[in-house]
Image (cartoon, rainbow, N blue to C red):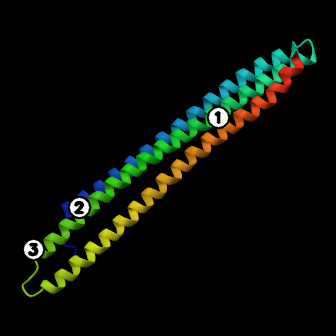
Amino acid sequence: MSSLAPEQLFAAQKVGFETISGLLTKAFGGVEKLIEVNLQVVKSTLTENQEITAKALSAQNPQDLFALQASYTQSVTDKAQSYGRKVYEIISSTQSEFAAAAEAQFQKYHRETQEFVDKLAKYAPAGSETAVAAWKTFITTASETASTTYEAAKNATKQAVEIAESNVSAASSVSAKRTRQAVVPVAAVEK
């Protein structure tokens, strides 16, 4: 027979359902933002391609086509970098919300475990002090180990995010530099 009253089981199930619902809402919010960004990219790409095609068809000489290609290349590079940053921001934001929810749950379970240990010690029968002390030591050690593991995972995630941010920045600057290098020879040909 369970030591939990039906009300406690119902409350625990309700909290679990609310937690899962909150996480799903955050996940769908992130997906919704990604879809929105992708729709914007598709719309702007279609519009820009129509404009570029019209300009290419009205070009009078090869230099005009080269200039058009160079400006288009720079535009595409800038938009790709912007898109990558937006996607990264959405993913990073969603991950941060998940991490905050996980940390809140971890802290709650940690508190509840401590309360359980304290109640166990308080209501233990006489003569069971050794067993209670062993349980308390075990639970405290397990809780500290979980806390240490959680902190290590949190720090590793933070480092991974920082590395990803620096990689995005580095890739953006290298890409922009290469595009500028490609545009300069075309500009020289135009003159």
> Where in the figure is residue 27, as x and y percent of width and height?
47, 46
Label 1 packing within 10 angstroms: few (<14), some (14-19), many (20+) = some
Q: Are marks 3 and 2 in contact (CB under 8 Å)?
A: no
Give the amino acid type for the residue marked by disc 2 in the picture: Arg
Which disc number belongs to residue 111? Answer: 2
Q: Secondary structure at mark 2?
A: helix
Q: Quadrant of residue 14?
A: bottom left
- Residue at (15% x, 70% y) in the render: 118
> Where in the figure is residue 121, as x and y percent of width and height?
13, 75
Work out whether residue 187 or residue 56 is closer to the camera in this orientation and state it: 187
> Where in the figure is residue 137, as x and y percent of width and height?
24, 78
For the residues labelled 1 and 2, the Cα–Cα distance comes to 44 Å
Left or right side of 165 for 9: left
For the residues labelled 3 and 2, the Cα–Cα distance comes to 16 Å
Quadrant into which the C terminus falls: top right
Query: Looking at the picture, does residue 130 appear above or below residue 29?
Result: below
Q: Quadrant of residue 50?
A: top right
Work out whether residue 79 or residue 42 is closer to the camera in this orientation and state it: 79
Query: Looking at the picture, does residue 138 appear above or below residue 110?
Result: below
Label 2 packing within 10 angstroms: few (<14), some (14-19), many (20+) = few
Q: Secondary structure at mark 3?
A: helix
Quadrant into which the N terminus falls: bottom left
Give the amino acid type for the residue marked by disc 3 in the picture: Lys
Asked whether the viewer can see residue 4, the reply is: no
Which disc number belongs to residue 81? Answer: 1
> Where in the figure is residue 94, as x and y percent of width and height?
47, 44
Could you tell which of marks 1 and 2 lies nearer the N-terminus? 1
Label 3 sits on residue: 122
